[in-house]
Image (tube, rainbow, N blue to C red):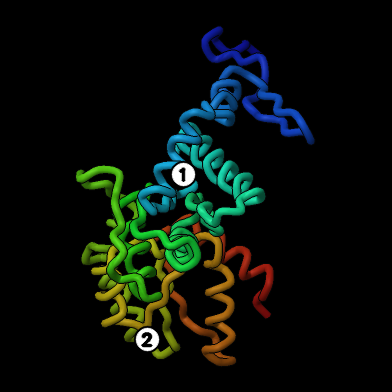
């Protein structure tokens, strides 16, 4: 078989091998990514000092660039190191930086406020994540805590926006009109308008990628012995994945 053009040839599959005390990047792409795992300590110290001084917490989504994640992780690590030897009480007990999925971002923001006396939150993610973080803060008694985005410009999510159209509403209306018990499980990174509109059509609960299967199985068990009709959206690929897993757990008779 003919070999790939020189520009497409690689000497090693891009990967990072992590040992007990070493990190070994394989290939130029992995080397570039690994370079961000040890950011300049001056930047780490300066940023941590500012977060403590201004009582600010940062919640970031897993999908943020590796350059940013490297710095954030180093800040969190440094805070926990300082906490071990802190006798003055100046170092907050709960990390001021969290990298998580969209649901846990809100939970971490609550813990920052309740355990580390944070007075404002910076949310690094799409607009809907900021909405979710703010809503979770409000539900837990921190409605006056401001949530700041990275830019004043719109940071959209095409997946979430697909649930705002008439086709999605028609699908929910059709499901609600059927005889089977129906439940709508919607991804948390949809707009508040989508959640509110959906709830007015069909019983709706939210989930995130880390707990969607658990949520669906628990709902199925609580809705009764008859087969429930669960609508999950708007992530089509996740729907297929969870349907396959659910079938393996509860195969058709």
Residue 113 seen in render? yes
Q: Whole-percent x and y of residue 20?
A: 79, 36
Residue 128 seen in render? no
Q: Residue at coordinates 22% horizontally, 47% vertically from top-left?
A: 154
Q: Residue at coordinates 58% horizontally, 41% vertically from top-left?
A: 78
Report the front residue among 26 and 36. 36
Q: Classify 57 as above or below 175.
A: above
Give the residue furthest to the front.
88
Q: Whole-percent x and y of residue 111?
A: 49, 65
Q: Residue at coordinates 61% horizontally, 51% vertically from top-left?
A: 86
Report the front residue among 44 and 241. 44
Between discs 1 and 2, the one toward the N terminus: 1
Q: Classify 181 as above or below 149.
A: below
Task: Give residue 201's quadrant in the image.
Answer: bottom left
Residue 178 - label: 2
Q: Classify 44 as above or below 24.
A: below
Q: Classify 181 as above or below 45.
A: below
* Mark 1 → mark 2, Cα distance in angstroms: 38 Å
Q: Whole-percent x and y of residue 37?
A: 58, 31
Q: Secondary structure at mark 1?
A: loop
Residue marked by disc 1: 63
């Amino acid at each position: 078989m003919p070999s790939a053009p020189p520009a497409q040839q690689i000497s090693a599959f891009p990967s990072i091998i992590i040992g007990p005390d070493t990190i070994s990047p394989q290939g130029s792409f992995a080397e570039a990514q690994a370079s961000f795992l040890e950011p300049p300590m001056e930047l780490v110290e300066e940023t941590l000092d500012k977060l403590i001084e201004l009582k600010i917490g940062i919640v970031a989504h897993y999908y943020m660039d590796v350059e940013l994640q490297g710095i954030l992780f180093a800040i969190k690590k440094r805070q926990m190191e300082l906490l071990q030897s802190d006798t003055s009480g100046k170092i907050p007990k709960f990390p001021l930086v969290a990298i998580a999925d969209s649901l846990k971002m809100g939970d971490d923001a609550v813990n920052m406020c309740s355990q580390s006396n944070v007075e404002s939150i910076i949310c690094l993610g799409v607009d809907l994540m900021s909405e979710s973080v703010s809503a979770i803060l409000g539900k837990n008694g921190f409605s006056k805590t401001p949530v700041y985005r990275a830019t004043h410009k719109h940071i959209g999510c095409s997946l979430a926006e697909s649930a705002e159209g008439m086709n999605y509403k028609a699908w929910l209306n059709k499901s609600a009109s059927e005889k089977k018990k129906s439940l709508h499980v919607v991804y948390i990174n949809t707009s508040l308008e989508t959640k509110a509109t959906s709830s007015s059509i069909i019983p709706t609960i939210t989930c995130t990628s880390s707990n969607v299967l658990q949520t669906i199985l628990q709902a199925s068990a609580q809705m009764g012995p008859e087969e429930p009709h669960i609508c999950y959206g708007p992530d089509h690929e996740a729907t297929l994945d969870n349907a396959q897993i659910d079938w393996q757990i509860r195969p058709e008779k």
